[in-house]
Image: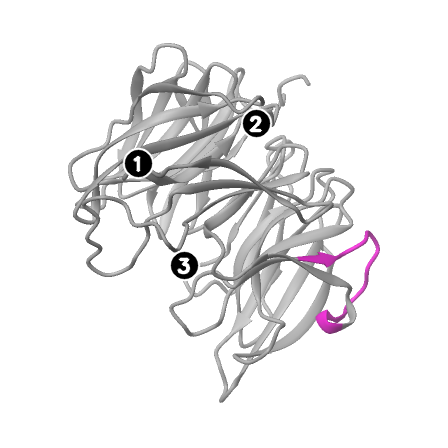
Amino acid sequence: MPRARWLPAGTVALYAAGAWESSRLYALAADGTATDLGQDVQGWAAVSRTGRWTARPGSPYPADSLVIVNLADGMAYTVPATPGLEVYSAAFDSAETRLAFLELGAPTGEDTPWAIVVASLADGSTARFEATARLDSALLPGFPIGWSAAGDELFINTFAPATEYSTAGVVGIAMPPGATAALVDALARRGLLAGGTYSSVPRLSPDAARLLYVARDPDYTPANYEPIAYDTAVNQLWALDVASGLPALLVEVTDGGALGGEAAWSPDGTQVLFAQGVYTGDTFAGLTLKIRDGSGDVRDIGPLPLLPGGWLSGLDWCMPEAALATVTAADSTVQLHTVDLASGGTSLVTSGEYVSVLGCIP
C-alpha cells in the first residue's frame, strides 16, 4: 500500500505528546525523526487506518464534543455530546467511512445513561444508540476498541460505571452500515471475553480477525511479587478468534517470572511482540522484549530501557524491522523509544508528561 500522501514521507506512526490537557500530534518516520502536524489534541485521541482522519475530545475532561479532522484536506466536524453526557474514546472502521464513540452520563441512583454514537466521515451526521446501565445489568457501557473487517460489528471493552473495575468483558455489537438510531438493547450482540479473564485493553489484529490480550492464571503468583495497591501481575498471552470466539494460549510464564502487561501484533499479524521479566516488590527488576512467531517459537530481542520503579505502558509494532516501546518512569515521566528488532538497540524519540502512540500507518 502506498504511503499516505497527506503525511510526511516515511511516516510509520502518529503519536501525541505534551500535557494530557494540551498535547500535539506528531508523525514519526522510520528513522525516528518526528514532525509536528500542527494539530492540538486533548486527552485521548484516535487515528484512522491510513492516518487520513483523527478524532479527539473537543475540550479537556469532561469532553463536551468530539472533533473529527481530515488531515488530507483540513475538513473538520465537531460532534456535540448529548446534554448531560460526556464523550469518551473512539474507533474508526477499516474503510475509513465512519467512527464510533462512547457517550456516558453520571449515575442517577442505580441507573447510568450511556450511548454508542456512530458518526459518518462523509458529512459528520450521527446515529445514536441509547442504553441505561445498572450494576446488575448484563448490558454495560464500553469503550470502542475496533470494528470487524466487514465493518458490520463493533467491539467494545465494557466496564461497570462509577466503580474501580476497568474491564467487565469484550462485547461485539452488530452495527451494519446504514444502521439508524435505536436502543442498544435492540441490536444483536455477543460476548467475546468475560470480565475477569483478561487484563488491559485487548488489541485487534491488523486483519481484525483476532484479539490479543494478557491474563493471569489465578493459581500462579510471580516470585518476589508484592503489590502495594492493585494486583496487576500477568503471566499469559492469548489470542481470541473473533469469528469462533475460541481463545488460543500463545505464551505462558511459569518459572517465577511475569509478562510486562503490553503486547503488539506484527504488521502482518503473524507474530506477537511482548515483554517478560521478574518482579522486585511491585515493579519489574527489568524487562526483556521477545517475539513469538507463527510456529510458536520465541526469541529474545533485548532489554527494554526501563528506569528503576518504572513500567512498560505501551508496545506498537509499526514496521517489520522496528517497534515502538512506551515506558513510564517512577515520577510519571513518559518516554517513547524505537526498538531495532534485529540488534535489540533502542533510541529515545521523545519524553514528557504525556506521550501516546495513536496508531501505526501502513
Note whether 108 is above or below 88 in the view shown. below
- In the picture, the disc for residue 255 is 1
Q: Earlier in the sequence, mark 3 or mark 2?
A: 3
The 10 Å Cα crowd at callout 2, few under 14, some 14 to 19, many 20 or more, is many
**Magenta residue check for 184:** yes
- The magenta stretch is 172-185
User: Which amino acid type is shown beneath numbered disc 1?
Assistant: Asp
Q: Is residue 73 visible?
A: yes
Quarter containing the N terminus: top right
Residue plotted at (76% across, 56% down): 175
Residue plotted at (63% across, 72% down): 139
Residue nearest the viewer, comparing 178 with 213: 213
Residue nearest the viewer, comparing 52 with 247: 247
Q: Which residue is mark 2?
A: 361
Q: Earlier in the sequence, mark 1 or mark 2?
A: 1
- Where residue 60 appears, x then y in whole percent? 41, 59
Dot 2: what SS?
A: loop
Spatial separation of the CA atoms under disc 3 and disc 2 = 27 Å
